[in-house]
Image (tube, grey):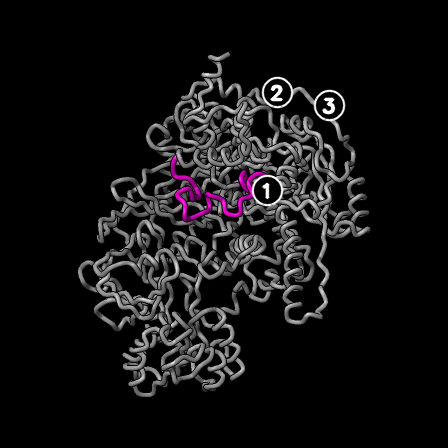
Amino acid sequence: METKESFIPYVGKIIDIKQETPDVKTFSVVGLDGKKLFEHIPGQCAMLIVPGVGESMISITSSPTLETHMEFSIKKCGCVTEWLHNAEVGQQICLRGPIGNGFPVDTKLKGKDILVIAGGIGIAPVHSVVNYMMDHRSDYGKIQVIYGSRSMADLVRLEEMKNVWMKQPNCSIDLTIDRAEDGWDGHVGFVPPYVTELNPDPSMTVIMCGPPILIHLSLDALKKLGFKDEQVFTTMEMRMKCGIGKCGRCNIGDKFVCKDGPVFSFDQLGELPPEY
Amino acid sequence: MLSIAADKIDSLFELIGSKQPLYLPVDNNSGKADFKKWEKGVKLSSALKTVRSAKDFFFPKTEHMVSYKVCGKEIEVEDPRKDVEDFVIFGVRACDAKGFECIDNVYMHMNPQDSYYTNRREHGTVITLACNEPVKECFCSTYGIDASLAKASGDVSSWCADGTFYFAANTDKGKKFLEAAASVLKDADDKAVEATKKSISEKIEKLPFAHLDISKLGKVTPEQMNKIFDKDNKTKIWEKASEACLGCGTCTYVCPTCMCFDVRDFATGTDKGIRQVRCWDSCMYNDFTQMAAENPRHTQKERSRQRFMHKLVYYPMAHEGLFSCVGCGRCLESCPVNMNIVKVIKMIQEAGEL
Amino acid sequence: MQDKLIARAKELLAEGKVQKVVGWKKGLFEDDITPAVFTTAEELDKDFVFNKYCKANLSKYLVKITREIEVAKSTTRMNNTMAKQRDPNAEDKPIPQAVVLVFLKPSDTYSFTQLLKENRITRGDVYAIGVPCQDTLDGGDVCENCKNKKPVSCDELIGIEADIEPVESARMAEVAKLEAMTADERDAFWKNEFSRCLRCNACRDICPACTCEKCVFDNNKLYTSQKVAETNFEESLFHIIRAWHVAGRCTDCGECSRVCPQHIPLYLLNRKFIKDINEIYGEYQAGSDMETKPAMLTFNAEGDPETTIVYDRSHDKEAE
């Protein structure tokens, strides 16, 4: 049959694996022809399929401006991700994608000052949008990143943040770890109180990604500083199977997180039933 | 209008069924009816409803999606899709036919299109049959669905009146069907059909649930939706609706509009082949939204609420007010603990100022 | 009868002897009764019903309800201990006691006893009232079975005597018919029946013997995990495995067949197991009392057949 059916996946190849932290690895994937498999918008995801093991929805960590391949920074936490962590370079995997709506980089984010708040592996989807903005630097204003993790070793892609992002004009990175440790002279503490401490300008547009508790508390902190719901964007995490708005698993209210999301602004989330 | 004597209907079935798969409601040995493939000797059931709806033909219980062959580090993907053979479904009631529309909206009209479902829909011809004897569990009229088929439904509408079957084509596919059957059909006027439509409409008006109050439901505002959602359990609707619920999934499987599915892998044996199959699933199951970290719908109350609100509120909000319930009454008949959507609609109606 | 039950329930609630009542609730028509929990006299007056359509076996709901009661108790005990650790003078919060009233027909009381034996229900949290079996609409031998059971493990009886006159039971007649078929005929019979199966799991979810926290069919780590079956083999697999799992614990209450939306005669499968257990291990009725050791959990060195790989009954027949 000629029509491209979303259920029939692409076959890709892992060409590079990098250990970022003890439980996070970055996989670089291309098609069997050596080229990138498909184009995407920052914030979109792909379904990584390991036949016989399972499928997992992973956000595409690399920006679409990276032309040679796609990158996925994946945390080991289930059977598919564990299998991937044990895989070797050259291993083929199947992919379905791109899935979801991505960040509104050409509309609501353009021309704005951007504040990024992330925790733990939540920095992965945010990477794609920050790198995209770095590659279209003049389209965006100030970029400030507030990122926290459990410990120094758990800060994902720290090198890229220090050596690339921090060197860009009008960019700042504020890092924090949960507990003090030797060799760290930066901020210690959770992300939400750090946000309050840094007192960002409420005219900025915010992108948040991390564990639900971080999102809830950071949103409270931002509201107190004067931010409005429509300025704050997040990516929602839900159990997904088809990724194309058919199987019903990620249905919340009249939306499908896989299709109408995973990126939502908080005023959009406010219109959904209060299930999460 | 074309017709055939009811005692000659088998000749129509033979004419059509010998050339392509023909499915019709047939009595099984438990005394109920199910759709079965026609073969010589099979008799049309006189039951009002089949136990399961007709959605099985377009959205089957299990469906083979993709095949994989894994060899070392290499994976080969096989596309198993084939054009489905043309087929005919006879005796579909108005409720089931409307159910197809609900599933079409998601599977065919929402991008990306589901090609497996679409292919089946393109190759299937639906012959609807008017309901001479609706029962007390029926409430299709609540949603404006017409069991007398005064409104065109399916590819061909049919009626059984005065010992005769009458047919009228609604679409090109329907016309082709009637042309193929021309040798056994006679011309007829529509007097008997009009009388039947009238008598069915009168019977429907007398049913206890002919016009359930659904004014609080459908395409509502987010504020109204939150009130029905009842996060703080003030009305206790969802607690009561779910306390006996087993979470078994029966309601989902007999429902003409439920369309959720699961995707599973099966190893096919020694050839290192893996088959990815989708199968029916139910939002009432406790693993439906289970994630590694948590399950947002962790008790039956949340899951029951999701199912009913999806059918009565969320789906209409996303699809111009169309309800994802067609009033077929199967959940009333099949639920092991007799919970059903009519009871929920009444609970919402009686919850007072929402 | 209904009024007597409502009155007694209201009495026990008012006296504080029970805090919840598990009973049957009125539906839209006469026959669509739903099991429900009542907590006030008003709710009982408004919705409680007891008639010939009250087929639902309420004993299984007690598993969850008594678990909640016990968890509340142990949580309070734990909190008290922790409070004492922080402050030795801390006052113990009272342990919340709660009792739930349940109405059980004779057949239901056997499921109740079976669950008590398996420690799934805490006896002290339940006040059981035995009520008479109602001749149900499609009655048949489910009712006959119920009439052949005396109410056991009850705290009181209303409208029913403690001893019963056993009724001549022909419940194994249909099983004997199946046994008389050839293997191929039987295979065709069951394949035909199971072909209608949706894997809705209603039979498993209503069965009082199926109370596993994680059913083997829901466990994704096992190869038996399945939803809708793809092949005939898988369809049969579920029912045969389930029949094995409940063998010796099935009380023949008939609920599985009553709830099946496709009207598959599952009770025949379970009855075959009961017939075999009766013949091989001696007459045994699951749940008939608290003392008798479960047939499938006891080995009688005297009478039980020697364990070989396959037990072939034809040997016994030759010996006869």
On whether disc 2 and disc 1 are found on a single subunit, the reply is no
Per the image, the residue denoted by label 2 is C170
Per the image, the residue denoted by label 3 is C165
Q: Nearer the viewer, residue A144 or C76?
A: C76
Amino acid bearing label 1? Leu
Q: Mark 2 and 3 residues: CB-CB less than 8 Å, in contact? A: no
Q: Which residues are magenta?
A: C202-231
Task: Tell me the quadrant of the picture where the C terminus of chain B can be found.
Answer: bottom right
Alpha carbon of mark 3 to alpha carbon of mark 1: how far?
37 Å
On whether disc 3 and disc 1 are found on a single subunit, the reply is no
Alpha carbon of mark 2 to alpha carbon of mark 3: how far?
16 Å
Give the crowd class for mark 3: few <14, some 14-19, many >=20 residues within 10 Å.
few
Mark 1 residue element: helix
Give the crowd class for mark 1: few <14, some 14-19, many >=20 residues within 10 Å.
many
Q: Nearer the viewer, mark 2 or mark 1?
A: 2
Q: In the shown orientation, is residue C179 left or right of residue C100?
A: left
Alpha carbon of mark 2 to alpha carbon of mark 1: how far?
32 Å
- Residue C205 lies in quadrant: top right
Residue B119 seen:
no
Q: Position of residue C86 (x, y in %)?
A: 64, 71
Does C225 lie within the magenta span?
yes
Amino acid bearing label 3? Glu
Q: Position of residue A7 (x, y in %)?
A: 32, 52
Q: Which chain letter goes with mark 3?
A: C
Mark 3 residue element: loop
Per the image, the residue denoted by label 1 is B332
Give me the residue at 72% from left, 52% from top: C98
Q: Position of residue B259 (x, y in %)?
A: 45, 49
